[in-house]
Amino acid sequence: MAEGGEPSQSQPPADAPAVPPPAPPIAWGPPAAPAAAMLVGRYVGGRPPFTIGRLLSDAFGRYGADPVRLFLVTVIPSLLSFGSSYLSNPFTNPQGAVRFGGLVGLVSVVVSILASATTFALLEGGPSLSFTRAVQRGFQRSGWFVLTAVVLGLIVFVVVLLVGLIVTILAIATRNPAIAFLLFLVMFLVVVWVVIRLSLAFAATVVDDLDTNHAVRVSWRMTGPAGIWLRLVGAGLVLGLLVGPASLGALVLQFPAMFGQLPLLVIPSAILLSAIAPLGSALTYSAYRRLVPPTFPPWAGMPATLPGEGAGAESIPPPAFSEPRFDLAAKEILLIVAILGVLGVALFTFGIGQLLSGAFQLPPFPRGLYPGSPTFPGFPGFTFPPFPTFRP
């Protein structure tokens, strides 16, 4: 108060209207697609733990949270693919092999691409995402998904070509079988390393609206530290050991059908493979999401803005990581995989025994359909070509 009891000029009168507080600044805004490469590991409070156990727990947890839809998305293209194999198989359908097999095969490829993109959409959106929206998302990103697959295939092909050429030259120069084997082993490991470093680009293409260029760059950058890609290799090996026996059993079921015997075995084979296939996509997505925060507001239908303080103010929360729970459903998925693994080992052992005992024989290839077609070891009448001789 100033002298004489009059109010100070620095203080508003008591009856003055209250001035609303300034609107809070937006804490985190949706970045442009290229800027997503700068978000690697920038979760608020630090990146979530990235361990082999957490990655596997995430994979089974996400599959267990939405098992029916993930299985359906996988089994439909599998059945189409096996149907294409059946129709184009000269042993099971010699009259319409070329006419029908190619058309069904083309449809199965298109459906497989859509199903792969839709699988990542379901993993991102979770059980609350409508199936229609997930399929729509698969359509929207299928073009970039295919382009990413083509680019990654070309990159891997170039790596195999260059590294294989170097390894072959060194193997010829050394003329030592042991060294040659080690060199080709090194080439295999290099190719696997490149594939691991680039594999997360598929998830980035679908869930974060990245084009192929930035998806590949983000995948390569986020898997740069040895602690990241080594854990990806470890998680992939553990998952492969879990689902490998079931895969072998499914392949044994396909083997008789491939040569016209018990063709309906392709149906349980397709179902068996489809039951374990979503785990690979779930592992890839889980690794990607633990490394890169979601681009907010996401396409999955979450609110873009939230009410803030003050009149008309809005604030966007920072991205957060939601860790899936390894609950009863996830444990049931793990138990089913273990049972399928035991069944796969039994089927594989039975199939090998049938082949070795002669109960199952490879039929002769129908030369009338494809004149001049070669035969292979196991076909009746097969003989190895004579060893070439050269005059001095």
Image (cartoon, rainbow, N blue to C red):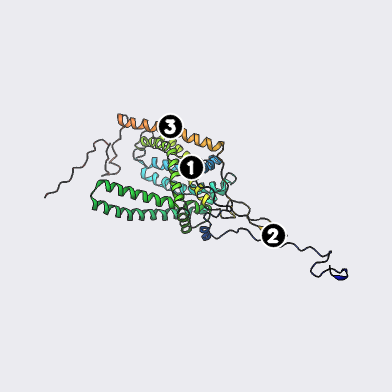
What residue would you read off at disc 2? 313
**Whole-percent x, y for residue 102 in the image:** 39, 46
| Residue drawn at (60%, 45%) of the image | 128
Residue 364 or residue 353, whichever sits in front:
353
Alpha-carbon distance for marks 1 and 2?
43 Å
**Whole-percent x, y for residue 126 in the image:** 57, 45
What residue would you read off at disc 1? 279
**Whole-percent x, y for residue 134 in the image:** 55, 48
Give whichever of discs 1 and 3 has the lower sequence position: 1
Relative side of 255 to 76, left or right: left
Q: Secondary structure at mark 1?
A: helix
Residue contact between numbered discs 2 and 3, judged by CB atoms under 8 Å: no
Name the amino acid type tagged 1.
Leu
**Classed neighbour count for the residue bearing mark 1: other residues with Cα under 10 Å, few (<14), some (14–19), many (≥20):** many
| Residue drawn at (47%, 36%) of the image | 337
| Residue drawn at (46%, 59%) of the image | 213
What residue would you read off at disc 3? 343
